Image (tube, rainbow, N blue to C red):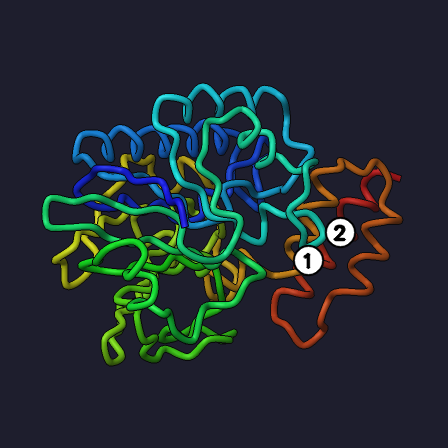
Amino acid sequence: MNLEHIQADGLFLIGDPHIAATPPGQRLSSYTSDILDKLEACLKRSKELNLVPLILGDLFHWPRDNSNSLLVDLIALFGPYKPFVLIGNHDKYQARFTPDVSMAVLDAANVVRLMSEPGPAFVLETPEGNVLVGASPDGFPIPKEFEREEFERENGKFIKVVWVAHHNVAFPNYKKPHYAIKEIPGIDWLINGHIHGPRPSSTAGGTTWANPGNISRMAFTRLSLERKPQATIWTPHCTDLERWDIPHRGFYEVFPNQEFLPEQDDADAAESKFLQGLERLAWKRTHEGSGLKQFLEENIDPDQPESKLIWDLYTEVTDGNR
């Protein structure tokens, strides 16, 4: 297998930026520039430290129909660095990676190194020795084992094998696990995106599982208020990821100053199908209340504490515009 070889001291890991021209959820209008600034800070820091920048999936919040100006900004930003980008679920349209998604534009512009297929992705040549980096993009399983000795017979020895993934993994306090944390023979590190809230790393046998969390505060929750946007660093002899605080603005500079709804997990809030649908309705800027009413009637759970608040708000807005 002919893999790209890159000389660097390690990996600079950037979790789920979810960039969008239209702010998701309750984020204020500065959202796009805020995320662009974070990405630029991360790329500059990776260069300063001689690390390979790697985005752990969900670069985009909407898979397509992003503005040309946003794509131009990303092409200009990524061009000098050419980061690796793992494909996440938000980067695909109807669960497929197709030529009409925004990520395909960046790939065609040759400003990213796309990780869209499962398996070994590139070789990291470090002063300590060579490291194999593999990938399980969204929609492809995390391997149960990796035939390391067989692969090394053709490609030489590796001091470490690092696998990046974008999946529901059974980290502590995550409610939608699909993959259990267990040893994966042949893989030393499994570094996961997708789950927005950082989780403590966990070692099972010879495999350490890490979930650094995303760099973007997506949901208006106390968890988002309390945590700092961070990128993380992996080097061959680290025992855990090193965290780096990304320069960012205050919570109430990027969210409205209002009361919190009842507690909701950060990742659940960001991935909620209800909230995604509500965001999409707002994004389309519907001018009449009928579509929104139907959506609310079909999706509101009367047992949830926020349901009355949402319905009262809808009634107030639509009654006031008759």
Disc number placed over residue 275 in the picture, else none: none
Residue 19 is situated, as x and y percent measured from the top left of the image, at 51, 37
- Residue occupying the point 76% across, 35% down: 285
User: Could you say whether the residue bearing mark 1 is in a helix, strand or loop?
Assistant: helix
Q: Nearer the viewer, residue 118 or 253?
A: 118
Q: Are marks 2 and 1 in contact (CB under 8 Å)?
A: yes
User: Is 272 placed left or right of 299 in the picture?
Assistant: left
Question: Picture coordinates of residue 38 (x, y %)?
Answer: 36, 34
Q: What's the amino acid at mark 1? A: Ile
Can residue 230 be seen from the camera position used here? no
Disc 2 to disc 1, how far (Cα)?
Answer: 6 Å
Q: Label 2's element?
A: helix
| Image position, residue 7 (x, y; %) | 22, 37
Residue identifier under label 1: 310
Quadrant assignment for the C terminus: top right
How many neighbours does mark 2 have within 10 angstroms: few (below 14), some (14-19), or many (20 or more)?
some
Kindly identify the residue that appears in the image at 69 percent across and 47 percent down: 93
Give residue 26's quadrant in the image. top right
Amino acid at the residue labelled 2 = Tyr
- The tag on residue 314 is 2
Instruction: Identify the residue at the far front of this view.
Output: 154
- State the residue in front, 14 or 253: 14
Q: In the rendered image of this protein, does residue 247 appear above or below residue 271? A: above
Crowding at label 1, few (<14), some or many (≥20) Cα neighbours within 10 Å? few
